[in-house]
Image (tube, rainbow, N blue to C red):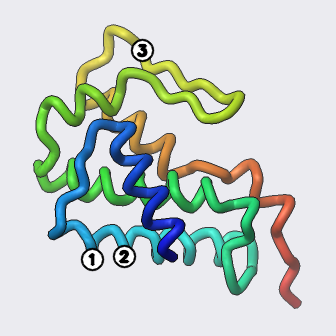
Amino acid sequence: MTAVLDDVKSRLAIFGYEVQPEDGWALSYCIDRAAQDICNACNLDTVPDGLHYAQVDRACGEFLQAKYSTGKLSDETTQAAVQSIKEGDTTVQLSIGSSLTQRMAAAIATLQNAGESEFAKYRKLVW
């Protein structure tokens, strides 16, 4: 979990969010929730190494959604978080004319749904 936590903190820094000491429990919760979502979708007991970054992005999405919905993200953080998203060979461009709220919601939704196209590779059938 330490590797995932470190990667989540680094990923949040990319979006302009500086992790605070009081964020520890919330980050752990979001990481565990992302792991549970992935394991439930794939019928697995643990998150495979190949879905590590999907877990990191999903945890970041959950965390940012919680912060955003409670009004605990500053304008500077939300502005930085929605400039552009590039992950590997996938690029998500948010429309220029949309409002800050729409762009933030799109960025968070992209993070929360990360890796879904990769789940099929790891999915197990349960009888």
Residue 19: image location, x then y, percent = 24, 56
* Residue type indicated by callout 3: Ser
Residue type, mark 2 in image:
Tyr
Q: Which-is-in-front pick, marks 2 and 3?
A: 2
Rendering coords of residue 15 (x, y %):
35, 37
The residue that disc 2 covers is 29
Q: Residue at x 44, y 66 (%)?
A: 5
Position of residue 57 in the picture relative to residue 124 (left or right) = left
Q: Earlier in the sequence, mark 1 or mark 3?
A: 1
Cα–Cα gap, marks 1 and 3: 34 Å
62 or 8, which lies in front?
A: 8
Question: Tag 3: Cα neighbours inside 10 Å, few (<14), some, or many (≥20)?
Answer: few
Residue 14 sits in which quadrant?
top left
In the rendered structure, the answer to whether residue 84 lies left or right of residue 81 reads right
| Residue density around tag 2, few if under 14, some if 14–19, many if 20 or more, within 10 Å | some
Q: What's the CA distance linking mark 2 and mark 3?
A: 31 Å
**Residue holding disc 3:** 95
- Give the camera-side residue of 82 and 24: 24
Q: Residue at x 53, y 67 (%)?
A: 3
| Three-letter amino acid code of the residue under disc 1 | Trp
